[in-house]
Amino acid sequence: MDPKLWRAAQRPGVLLSLSLEAIVGVPLVFPILYLLVNQLSSAKNTYYLQTILQIIAWSLLAYFISDKLIDAFKETLQKKGLFGRDLNKAGIQQDKKPVPEALGIVISIVFLVITIQQQVTMQFTQERLIEHNAGLLAICMVVLLGFVDDVVDLKWRHKLIVPTVASFPLLVAYKGVTSVVVPKPLRLMLGSYVDLGLLYYIYMGMISIFCTNAINIYAGINGIEVGQ
């Protein structure tokens, strides 16, 4: 969400009025503090402490860059016709202030660049690096789906195909376990673990399709996309 639009939507007389930065930042403070205190209490976990501090630094940098780029690109996208109007506000639609769309491409590019830069400063094993890059490729393809949908309004059959293809690099690179823990009432019949094998990959591919389209469907409803 554009911070300026958030501030403009604030109403006088509201007992509790929080800035967008506070709403984003406050929920992140407590888990970060917990991780820092937990790692500082153990001298053996210096690697994890350094990793946490690097992630915090990169995340803050990504936030401030995204905040600046949103202001820089929103007018450009609006001039190209990539804007909508808030249906949840009272008044005539034509009189409402246009809200720029497709700004997710800006945030996504910042995320991808920052995540790639983390490979330089953080220690990755060769196997971990393969999975990491496969995940980045999948995310890049899903981002492309979202931007193309904003521009040309894709049909639903296309929205199902692209996430399926996007999940292939991640599924192929995955070399972890394909077993799941069985609920206790069923362990007498099935045991503690069940190896799904190929079904595990099919399930993960379906999860990719669901998550991508769940975000895409509700992207225009205020608050729901952020909550997801």
Image: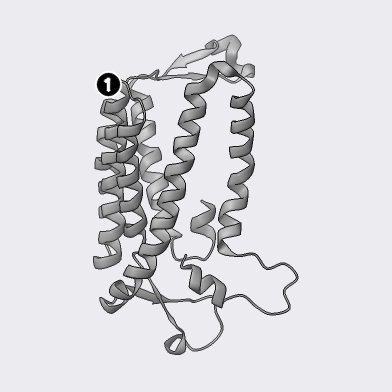
Q: Amino acid at mark 1?
A: Gln
Residue 20, compared with residue 31, is above or below; it is: below
Element at badge 1? Answer: helix
Viewer-nearest residue: 180 or 186: 180
Q: Quadrant of residue 100?
A: bottom left
Horizontal arrangement in the rendering, residue 214 relative to residue 184 (left or right)? left
Q: Residue at x 30, y 33 (%)?
A: 120
Tell me if mark 1 has few (under 14), some (14-19) or many (20+) residues whose alpha carbon lies within 10 angstroms of its own.
few
Q: Residue at x 49, y 73 (%)?
A: 4
Q: Residue furthest right?
A: 15
Q: Residue at x 37, y 19 (%)?
A: 176
Residue 190, compared with residue 33, is above or below; it is: above
The way the protein has been coloured in the rendering is: one colour
Viewer-nearest residue: 226 or 93: 226
Locate residue 5, reporting x and y percent.
Answer: 50, 74
Image label count: 1
Mark 1 = which residue? 126
Viewer-nearest residue: 191 or 208: 208
Q: Residue at x 62, y 51 (%)?
A: 26
The answer to whether residue 155 shows anywhere in this view is: no
Locate residue 134, reporting x and y percent.
Answer: 27, 33
Horizontal arrangement in the rendering, residue 107 relative to residue 194 (left or right)? left
The answer to whether residue 128 shows anywhere in this view is: yes
Locate residue 187, reporting x and y percent.
Answer: 59, 13
Residue 94, compared with residue 183, is above or below; it is: below
Horizontal arrangement in the rendering, residue 159 relative to residue 14 (left or right)? left
Locate residue 168, reporting x and y percent.
Answer: 26, 35
